[in-house]
Image: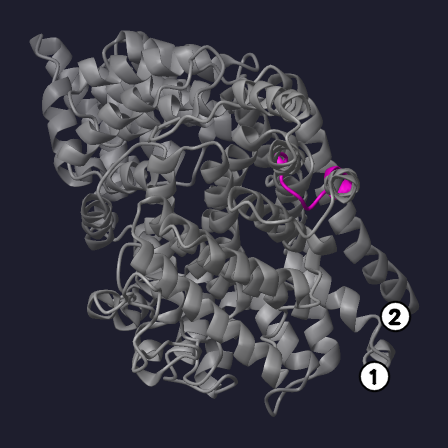
Amino acid sequence: MRSPHLIRLWFALLFCSSLVAGNLPQQDIYQRADALYRHGRGDSHDAAEALQLFLVAAEAGHPSAQFYAGRMYQLGHGTERSLSRAVDWYRLAGQNGQARAWNNLANVYIDAPELAPEPLAFLHCYEQASQLGMAMGSNNLAKIYHNGKHGIEADYSRALHYYMTSLKQYPNYPGVWNNVGRLYEKGGPGLKRNLKLAERAYQKGVDLEDADALYNLADLYYDEELDAEADEIVNLLERAAKLGHVQAQFRLGWIHESGRYGVRAYYKAIAYYEKAAEQGHGTALNNLAMLLIKSRRETENSPRVIELLEAAAALNNQYALNNLGYRHVYQKFPEADPRTGIDLLIRSAGLGYREAILNLGKMAQNSELRPYFTPTELAHWAQAEVDLKKVARQSANDALEAADAWIRSQDYAAALAVIDEHFAAYTQLKSKDSYSFLSRIWWDAQTQRGRSDPEWSWRLFDWCRRQYDKELYHLADNRMTVRRNQIAGLTEVGRLGLVRESCEGLRTLLNEIYGLTFDFDSVLAGIDTTGAIPAETQFDLKVSPAMAKQASWNTLPGSILTNSAAHSLVALGDERLYAGDWQAALYFSRWVELWAEEVLASGEVPKNNPRGWVEETLQDSLLLRARTYELLGDLPAAIAVYEIIIHDGRRPYKGRLTDTATLEATVLRSRLGESPAISIAELEALEVKQRANHFDFGQAGEENQLARAWQYHARGEPAAAHQLLEGVLAFTEQNEPHFFESRP
């Protein structure tokens, strides 16, 4: 290779001879250099020669040569890296109209701020590039204002301006439509959130097969902020996954694992998790390990499971750190070490993972494990568990307090927006306990403000439902129970259209978890007006092998249905009764009665299902049967069922349903002209008890007054009856149900 000094000397002589001839060879020299360098893609052995040629042309005033001289010094191509020399050549090229030189000069000032004449010099350079028509310069400015980088505060309006400028300079500039969508989806300084405009921007990116736009549009639909069919969401994610989008691959794995949009397909979930895992996605590695166990392809602590968890833990994945740590502590595999496990759990807890904090809190109180903790750790983790729940509940209290004025004014949408905002802020905390936060909100919906305002109750339960589906998807019983409570609130305010929709969601969930199919039309046809169920009718009280095949992985054949599942069947029966389908109502009632009787007789109460819950579910199923008999006009049969509830000796939730049965039986006896089994004085005492019972419904006192009015009427005291009815009517007018309304 020729010496750079000889090259410079040769071209200097050539330059002088050309000067004498009046013909400068700038362009020829530049083209020779450009052919060697090829924007950095040429042979690296030719880089030094290319630089010398660029320098000759640059010193002669060639703007492009000046740019490439700066670039080669910036990158260290053909020479030692020298940012100061790069700055000199970029500045000169920029002054000679090279937009890309201004753009690169800005990059150098950001990387080496000590070379910049002032702190924000990079901003001026990007602006120069933008004004000269360079889309990359405009895009770089947009990203700075979008993300609030390099000491510049975020300004979404300016970011939008520069993104749109870059699109004018370079139509369909890669990635820009996606970034415009992000601006509108999130909203920020100077720009209001607008999901429809976000959707439109993402769609333009989708049309260009932008993987990020494909994923973000699917994510917008996935979070149910805009309506879309499940097939469209999956299609968008599949297109992004084919382009190598790792988060799309992971999301598809989760969709197929959970069965969110249909039947679970573990083999598809495993395939997508493996693709994401190959790209180093920590949660995909963790989920792949767990799914291999769920699908019974691997044992719980097999070498492959441990290998996957170790790989995810090496990426500092909080879930894998917890899962691997737990296996170390309890020595689930040969190389396990309890102290190593505690260190892994501490790392997971340090990332804010609730389960790790709770695990450490329990382990710190375990006499066999305490020796593996230091004294400081013992005290810290025992208290950390308490503090985690305390902060969650206080954050929920703060949310409810902030929403209080809106709740009182019955602006429920504004109230929920406030709670949503508080919950979003809470979930950004490093250590969070979403379960405890939602449990506090649930309590408000069920027993506090929700008791006196059923309209607020069902809306708040609907909010909880959405959070459980997103944040706590694995808590199947909670997801069923929150839907059931929402249905109860909707029924109370007469929103029967929404009741129907919610029941469809509950049926889907019961099918997903337990494999229940509700294919019983032939059975219903055999139920006559006496309510007798055909003797040969079979009810699924336990999970059959056929059910287990399509149920959740941990729903094993022979396991008994949980109380949440049984109580959900009562809710479905109630909805069928309101729809006039008395045969289905009786079917659901009998199904749950048999289930409860078997559970209570055997003593095998499902795990985490207190006996009182089962007793309440049994009473609810009996109430459903009694009300069905009322619909059929068989009042004596209804009274007989109410009497079963009254005299069975069970008093769950302070006897709430026993009191309800007492009132219903009293009214029916009065309608039949029979002597009531309870006096007016006893009913008055019962009203006091009902109003004090926070488990009871808000209108329990009015139902009591109605029962007393019937008794006064039967005794020939119309004035007393009329006075009570006036109070009931006044209550009804203030709490007028929105019958058959399907949308809030």
- Left or right of 306? Residue 587 is left
What is the secondary structure assignment of the residue under circle 2?
loop
Badge 2 amino acid: Thr
Q: Is residue 510 magenta?
A: no
Q: How many marks?
A: 2
Figure check: 59 above or below 663: above
Residue 417 at x, y = what percent?
53, 25
Please give the name of the residue rendered at 84% of the width and 72% of the height, measured from the top-left corner: 365
What is the secondary structure assignment of the residue under circle 1?
loop
Q: Quadrant of residue 711?
A: top right
Please give the name of the residue rendered at 51% of the width and 39% of the height, measured from the top-left corner: 489
Badge 1 amino acid: Glu
Residue 178 at x, y = what percent?
28, 30
Q: Give the labeled residue for mark 2.
A: 374
Viewer-proximal residue among 697 and 685:
685
Q: Tell me which segment is drawn in magenta.
A: 691-699
Q: Give the labeled residue for mark 1.
A: 368
Please give the name of the residue rendered at 58% of the width and 49% of the height, measured from the top-left corner: 674
Residue 578 at x, y = what percent?
36, 44
